Amino acid sequence: MFGILRYILALMVVQTHLWKITPWAGNYAVYTFFILSGYLMTLVLHERYSFGPSGIARFLSNRALRIYPPYWAVLVISTVVAYQMPNIAAAVHRNFSLPSTCALWLENIVILGASHPTKATLVIPAWSLHIELIFYCLMALGFSRNRFIVFLWLSASLAYTTHLILLHPTEYQFWYYRYFPLQAGSLAFSAGAALYFIRTRLSVRPALAFATTALTACLMLGAGHIWNDIDALYLQGFYISIASGFLAVLALGAIDFSSVPRILKTIDRRLGDLSYPLFLCHVPVAALVLRWYGGGLYPNTARFFIIALVASHLGAFLIHAAIERPISRLRESVRGEAESPDVPPHLEDRHQGVF
């Protein structure tokens, strides 16, 4: 039951890029995404795949099939948009432009190496996918192998994060030391991995789980009213949001699945289906909206955000229907259903569509 959470987090990112009324919310959301990925990838490695060569190969192949086809589709669209309307692209996001070197083109195509969006980027969230892919590999190669390793990893991440906070406490330093770098994301991924080993001790009712999710969203949107100082927003606010995201993932992971109404399961799946393509496509779609709408529409306004958000949902639906849904059968074969008969049927509901 993570589809609703992922959809809310994707909306936070879209709002940050296209309206900026609460610009910090998208930053908070990305690290909650990381917590969720840490938890779910540890779960499927233990309960669907394995840590042997075959299991690792199937796991990484499935992750590649999940990440790359929708990404490449948006990459093609973004390339056309940035080439045909560079001024409009830059008006939507300052880094939305064609790469100027072969190395930058390669980073945009393979994702790995797209470490932060302070250079020409065609798919603005690519830097976070770079971090996701690296930690997928690390978790498969041993970081998520057992309780001892995971809690050792978490302890090291906590120590490193404490070091970063003491050394780089300001909002300006936040971007370059505590947010964009690969090693900064280790805290969220390791916390998510640790959740796998403690979630079996809990049983949570759906109402409490969704209340925790709503609280997380409210904290993200309302952080500016809690911490008026910009440095506090990106210090106390950011790390409290990580703690809140941790609790939301914990509650959703421990939910009593059998007590969830069928209609809520359907809504959860449908919104989850939209979250990744929405996360990917909203910036080029917003540029197209500016081009097609004509005069009277300006970036970073409520009107622009609403129109672009509706159009981005349409784009997300088309990407899911045309790319993700057809490729799901191939992903099922890679996942190896026949090799894991003891996996509960609802496991697929929990991790389907996570990026």
Image (tube, rainbow, N blue to C red):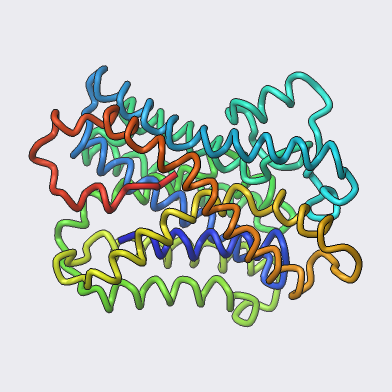
Q: Position of residue 255 (x, y in %)?
A: 22, 65
Q: Quadrant of the N terminus?
A: bottom left
Q: Position of residue 276 (x, y in %)?
A: 50, 50
Q: Which residue is drawn at the image coordinates 40% and 47% (left, top)?
A: 354
Q: Position of residue 156 (x, y in %)?
A: 41, 41
Q: Which residue is drawn at the image coordinates 49% and 55% (left, top)?
A: 275
Q: Which residue is drawn at the image coordinates 85% and 54% (left, top)?
A: 91
- The one of 232 and 242 positioned closer to us in this rendering: 242
- The one of 234 and 32 positioned closer to us in this rendering: 32
158 relative position to 2: left or right:
right
* Among the 4 quarters of the image, the one containing residue 244: bottom left
Q: Is residue 258 above or below residue 176?
A: below
116 relative position to 256: left or right:
right
Q: Is residue 225 above or below residue 80?
A: below
Q: Which residue is drawn at the image coordinates 31% and 48% (left, top)?
A: 351
* Among the 4 quarters of the image, the one containing residue 200: bottom left
